[in-house]
Image (cartoon, coloured by chain):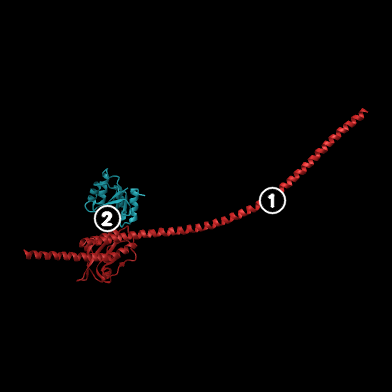
Chain colours: A red, B cyan
Amino acid sequence: MSDEKNIFSRAEEFMQLFKKGADFTQELLKENERLRFKMVQLEEENNLAKLSGGDSSNTLIAELNKKLQGLEQEMQKLLERHREVEDENKDFANRYLEIEQENNNLANLYVASYQLHSTLDFKEVLQIILEIIINLIGGEMFGILLLDEKTNELTAVATEGVEREDIPLIKIGVGIIGGVAKSGDNYFVDEIKPFSKFNPTIPIVCIPLKIKEHVIGVIAIYKLLEQKPKFSALDYELFTLLAGHAATAIFSSKLYSESERKLSTIQGFINLLTK
Amino acid sequence: MAYKILIIDDSPTMRQLLVFALKRLSGIEVVEAADGVDGYKKLTSGKIDLILADINMPVMDGLKLVSIIRSNPDYKDIPIVMVTTEGGKEDREKAISLGANAYLTKPIQAPQVLSIVKELLKIT
């Protein structure tokens, strides 16, 4: 009997335990269900968030792309402008060099012109012409020849690097020098070759000294300084200046010297008569 | 800072040409002399910062002038630039050995003169 009771009691305990296990399992199932529901809910929320969030980022990307394109276009424009400015700078630099050169040339021409008309003394004028040819053109051997209108001959009146006596009288129209005196046109050799021997009738340059179209003499250059291999653009301008201004300066100083001499003679006579 | 430059050349044309070139630099005062003796007198009578001297001159030539200037301790450091028609290597070497700082041959170009003057006077 007690065994039966014992068995029933243990069965009851087992049943309770089983019931507890069943309750626990029910709770677990409920919790599982709740969590599944929660997960589905979260997934939906997540999907919704993704959907709404995707639209805004696409818009943002589109905007950024637009801005980027705008900036790229602006950069291209700036690069183009930069290239234009660089080209302009190069042009300005070249122009500056040209103006600088022109400025130098004008300064030289001004000095030459100023000096030529700074005196009425014939010898000083000749000396200034020599100085211009040495210092501004770079002549080493040359002469100034004036035309005697009575004899039609050219006579050396001033020289550098060569004796005056070494340049003979030259008839107008004869040879290079005589030809220049007759035609009134400049003469330049095509190519300056190394100097070998002095020949008074064969210059490398011959410039007529002209007052309007009237030739009063010539400048004949036979040799340039060794550091001066060829003529520059300025030299041709200086030759043109010399052709006119040197001629005027020579002519004026000669007239002035003659008038001074005559005045002195007349003054002498007056002094004799009045004493 | 003002600099005083002494130009020694017997040619007034050359002196005027150099004055014109130097006028492009601000703060430059120019003193002129027609030969070596006159040049030395001007050097001793005032503070000179640089000398531009020709070689072929009457009374005293440029090379003699350079040697006299360099033998005087008061003027041994003044920069001297020779400006001459003598383009030979020997002339150049002689001038430099006597104490010239630079050697320019005629016909000169203004930018060339200015460049050397600025270099020797350390003008930026």
| Marks 2 and 1 belong to one chain | no
Chain of the residue where label 2 is placed in the rendered structure: B
CA neighbours of label 1 inside 10 A, class few (<14), some (14 to 19), many (20+)? few
Quarter of the picture holding the C terminus of chain A: bottom left
**Mark identifier at residue A144:** none
Q: Amino acid at mark 2?
A: Arg
Q: Nearer the viewer, mark 2 or mark 1?
A: 1
SS at circle 2: helix
Q: Nearer the viewer, residue B105 or B40?
A: B40
Residue A155 on image: x %, y %: 22, 66
Q: Nearer the viewer, residue A217 or B98?
A: A217
| Contact flag, marks 2 and 1 (Cβ < 8 Å) | no
CA neighbours of label 2 inside 10 A, class few (<14), some (14 to 19), many (20+)? many
Q: Amino acid at mark 1?
A: Leu
SS at circle 1: helix
Q: Nearer the viewer, residue A243 or A105?
A: A105
| Residue lying at the far left of the rendered structure | A275
Quarter-of-image position of residue B72: top left
**Mark identifier at residue A48:** 1
Quarter-of-image position of residue A68: bottom right
Residue A221 on image: x %, y %: 28, 63
Q: Is residue B66 visible?
A: yes
Residue corresponding to mark 2: B15
Residue B14 on image: x %, y %: 27, 56
In the rendered view, would you say A254 is above or below B49? below
Q: Residue at x 56, y 57 (%)?
A: A69
Residue A236 on image: x %, y %: 32, 64
